[in-house]
Image (tube, rainbow, N blue to C red):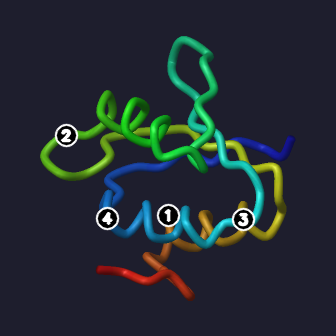
Amino acid sequence: MTPIISLHDVDVAQFLAVLDTCEGNVFLVTNEGDRLNLKSKLCQIVGLTKLIEGGKIAEASIICENKNDESKLFRFNFFGDTADADIK
């Protein structure tokens, strides 16, 4: 798998919209080393609930199987670029 991306102060709604555009599996890595597949809506709920503070993701580590997804999430994390995501 590709290197880990560390997310900080991420808007949850925008992050989930960008996740929906990812082609491969995207894993949330917990501090305990657990990996939750964020392509699963159930894992999104379980994983993100533990990390959300005041409507934003406080801190999370992400691993992507697909290089394009990694690039997309990197641009979102640093530049707020939601690309082709359908933000509601």
Question: Where is mark 3, residue-wise?
Answer: 69
Which of discs 3 and 1 lies nearer the camera? The answer is 3
First in residue order: circle 4 vs circle 3: 4
Question: Where is mark 1, residue-wise?
Answer: 77
Residue extending furthest top?
A: 32
First in residue order: circle 1 vs circle 2: 2
Circle 1 — which element?
Answer: helix
Task: Please state, as top left, top right, bottom left or bottom right, where the N terminus lies in the image.
Answer: top right
Residue type marked 2 = Glu
Between 74 and 35, the one lying in front of the other is: 35
Task: Please state, as top left, top right, bottom left or bottom right, where the C terminus lies in the image.
Answer: bottom left
71 to 60, vertically: above or below: below
Residue at position x 31%, y 64% in the image = 13
Residue at position x 82%, y 59% in the image = 66
- Label 4, label 1: how far apart the Cα atoms are: 13 Å
Residue 36 position, x and y percent, is 58, 31
Residue 38 position, x and y percent, is 56, 45
Quadrant of the rendered image containing residue 51 = top left
Residue at position x 51%, y 70% in the image = 18
- Label 1, label 2: how far apart the Cα atoms are: 17 Å
Question: Where is mark 4, residue-wise?
Answer: 13
Between 44 and 1, the one lying in front of the other is: 44
- Label 2, label 4: how far apart the Cα atoms are: 13 Å
